[in-house]
Image (spheres, rainbow, N blue to C red):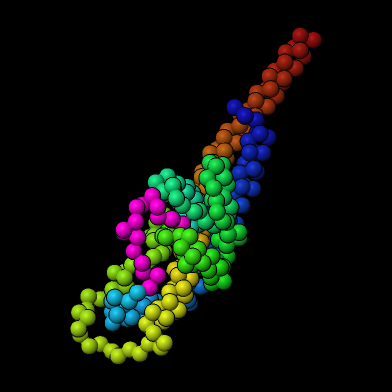
Amino acid sequence: MANTKEIKDRMNSIQDTLKITNAMYMISSSKLKKAKKRLEETEPYFYTLQSAMARILRHIPDIESIYFKSNEGKNREDVKVGYIVVTADKGLAGAYNHNVLKLAEEHLKHCPNSQLFVLGELGRHYFEQRNINIDQQFHYTVQNPSLNRARNISETILELYLKEELDEVYIIYTRMENAMQEEAHFMQLLPLKKTDFNAADIPTDVQMEDLKFDPSPEKVMDQIVPDYIVGFVYGALVESFSSEHNARMMAMEAATKSAKDMLHSLDILYNRARQAAITQEITEVIAGAKSQKKKKKKK
């Protein structure tokens, strides 16, 4: 059995760790609330953009736009694909990073003609260790998702897409399914699909409204789509950020519970060791007293 000093030192060490896990839980909780509030404040604008695109497509379903092009006629090996992978800058978040990176690696294996855009330091380390080429990394983006950072990412991707250096763009991020569960998602960012904007199954010959496009429907759509892409990327960043801190909260909560269980076990062990030491001391005192008594009798 370990002595009381060793047990006490271990208990102090666990208590120090417990303070850290509690602090990390509180920090993640605060950041999660702020991120959700920020997303709620911006959602109406981007939902309005999506609604406007749906209205245009309903009235002019055959509209021509590079953002709605189809790659069905191309050989899949010739299609240039871009992958935006959203990870975290830090660990201690359960399986959050692992799930995203595994999903990204699976898709990269089946796409030889691809470009990789990484957000998050853990993603960069992961791909570099496996000698997977990273075309561009967006530094410090995941720590504080903002519209400005989402716009920078979107402009980079859209520039490559419009130059036809990319035919398709996918984003791999984590979405919160509920307060207890996150799931890695693989979503197509470009080209857009017209069927995704059919908000309601309304026949096209039903009169709903009159629209006027200036200078043309194509120009209006080309103006709206980039802002819609910014909104989609921003939503993915905030969802990932929220999922990261939700996962970290759960991990820290589990670590805190484990630390408390260990402290309880060590407390029992400490009391046993202390009791054993006291018993040993009493036994030694009694033995010493008996020895002295025997010496006195002999004299």
Q: Does residue 96 appear in the picture of this structure? A: no
Reply yes or no: does residue 80 show up in magenta: yes
Locate residue 123 relative to residue 166 in the image: left or right: right
> Which residue does the image show at 60% across and 36% down from the upper left?
270
Locate residue 202 relative to residue 124 in the image: left or right: left
List x then y, in percent, for residue 73: 31, 58
Residues 263 and 230: in front is 230
> Which residue does the image show at 61% across and 52% down from the upper left?
20
Residues 184 and 247: in front is 184
Q: In which quarter of the image is the N terminus?
A: top right
Q: Does residue 10 appear in the picture of this structure? A: yes
Residues 143 and 125: in front is 125
List x then y, in percent, for residue 96: 47, 52
In the depicted structure, whether residue 34 falls above or below residue 111:
below
In the depicted structure, whether residue 9 falls above or below residue 236:
above
Q: Quadrant of the C terminus?
A: top right
List x then y, in percent, for residue 229: 45, 70
Task: Give the residues drawn in magenta, as a range.
Answer: 65-82
Q: In which quarter of the image is residue 141?
A: bottom right
Locate residue 74 relative to residue 104 in the image: left or right: left
In the depicted structure, whether residue 220 falls above or below residue 130:
below
Reply yes or no: does residue 293 show up in magenta: no
